């Protein structure tokens, strides 16, 4: 199973070294759109540095926990961040204090009703962190998208339009736990993928399917897509099996795996109940330390990707 995965990863990155592609990958997708001459473009556009899909079709591997807390820690560090909730369960919206029953329009309307992303964005309690909320309606989007022309690219176009109006340093998609059309939309709109991976025995099940899907998306829809990193989560410092799993994950995915490991920390379960990101809920807990450490790694990885556009040209 690992060997097959290895082959797929090699093909995805077009390189022997699985980390090479992400090291060099420039942000081209948005830049190339912006580079098209158009009167719509303002003179200067700071291109979003990273558009990241947090995905893994396995449920409970800390996608939402990672999306919320990474987004919040980056905002705390001064970056402008947008979190797009792509799960009908709306845990990211709920965890940031959005009352999902009291919002008029959600990501569903962007995907199905041609509403602009800009119109559904809400501010959160965290300065510089915005959210595009979701609710249970999104579960119907999968079927409804199927009959829409250009169904895989609806979110990509919505993001491009948004970036003409608003400037974000980071945009995260909190994906739902399946490889459905909504998730494909995220993979087509994203420049990079962050894969949370539980350090549990069965966590690698389904990875082959995920990598095959990524490969197909790269071949057919989004050649710039690259893997930002694999994040070991729910790490139990007390058990040998967690250590063994981490060793295996590092062994096979090599430096694709972030140095940061997210340890098991009950505060990370409690924080969403109080509708707070971890660093506001408990500034000193292990969860806060781990997500700030991940934040530093991500900033270091993406700094070289910053691009400026002047009069439709990449400066
Ligand atoms: N590091 C952690 N320590 C303890 N509990 C965690 C940790 N990360 C996530 N959890 C908990 O695990 C559950 C699943 O996490 P979640 O982020 O919702 O996963 P996903 O979005 O992949 O389904 C949630 O109850 C969450 O609070
Ligand atoms: Mg989730």
Image (tube, helix red, strand yellow):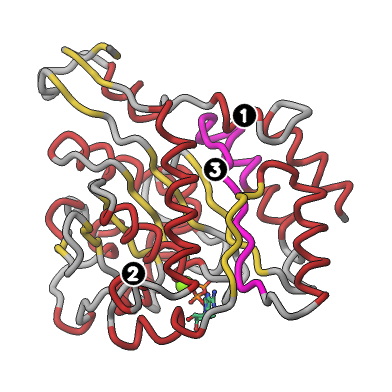
Measure the alpha-carbon separation of dots 2 and 1: 32 Å
Q: Residues within 10 Å of mark 3 (few under 14, many from 20)?
A: many
Magenta stretch containing residue 220, yes or no? yes
Q: Earlier in the sequence, mark 2 or mark 1?
A: 1
- State the residue in front, 261 or 188: 261
Point out which mark residue 21 bears: 1
Point out which mark residue 279 bears: 2
Q: In the rendering, at what x and y percent does residue 310 appear?
A: 19, 14
Q: Residue at x 35, y 42 (%)?
A: 156
Quadrant containing the N terminus in the rendered view:
bottom right
Helix, strand or loop for disc 2: helix
Helix, strand or loop for disc 3: strand
Camera-near label (3 vs 2) is: 2
Measure the alpha-carbon separation of dots 1 and 3: 9 Å
Segment colored magenta: 214-235
Q: Is residue 75 above or below residue 36?
A: below
Q: In the rendering, at what x and y percent does residue 58 appear?
A: 62, 70
Q: Earlier in the sequence, mark 3 or mark 2?
A: 3
Label 1 with label 3: CB-CB less than 8 Å: no
Quadrant containing the C terminus in the rendered view:
top left
């Amino acid at each position: 199973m690992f060997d097959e995965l290895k082959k797929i990863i090699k093909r995805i990155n077009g390189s022997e070294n699985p980390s090479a592609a992400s090291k060099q990958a420039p942000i081209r997708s948005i830049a190339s759109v912006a580079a098209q001459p158009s009167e719509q473009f303002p003179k200067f556009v700071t291109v979003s540095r990273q558009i990241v899909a947090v995905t893994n079709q396995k449920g409970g591997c800390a996608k939402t926990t990672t999306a919320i807390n990474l987004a919040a820690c980056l905002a705390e560090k001064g970056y402008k961040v947008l979190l797009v909730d792509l799960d009908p369960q709306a845990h990211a919206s709920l965890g940031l204090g959005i009352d999902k029953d009291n919002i008029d329009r959600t990501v569903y309307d962007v995907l199905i009703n041609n509403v602009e992303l800009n119109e559904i964005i809400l501010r959160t309690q965290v300065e510089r962190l915005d959210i595009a909320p979701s609710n249970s309606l999104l579960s119907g989007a999968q079927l409804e998208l199927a009959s829409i022309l250009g169904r895989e690219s609806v979110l990509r176009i919505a993001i491009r339009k948004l970036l003409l109006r608003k400037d974000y340093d980071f945009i995260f998609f909190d994906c739902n736990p399946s490889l459905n059309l909504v998730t494909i939309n995220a993979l087509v709109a994203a420049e990079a993928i962050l894969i949370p991976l539980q350090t549990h025995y069965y966590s690698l099940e389904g990875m082959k399917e995920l990598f095959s899907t990524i490969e197909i998306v790269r071949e057919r829809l989004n050649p710039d897509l690259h893997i930002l990193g694999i994040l070991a989560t729910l790490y139990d410092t007390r058990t040998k099996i967690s250590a063994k799993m981490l060793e295996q994950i590092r062994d096979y995915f090599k430096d694709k795996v972030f140095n940061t490991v997210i340890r098991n920390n009950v505060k990370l379960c409690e924080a969403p109940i109080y509708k707070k990101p971890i660093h506001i809920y408990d500034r000193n807990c292990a969860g806060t330390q781990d997500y700030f450490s991940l934040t530093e790694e991500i900033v270091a990885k993406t700094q070289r990707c910053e691009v400026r556009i002047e009069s439709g040209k990449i400066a």
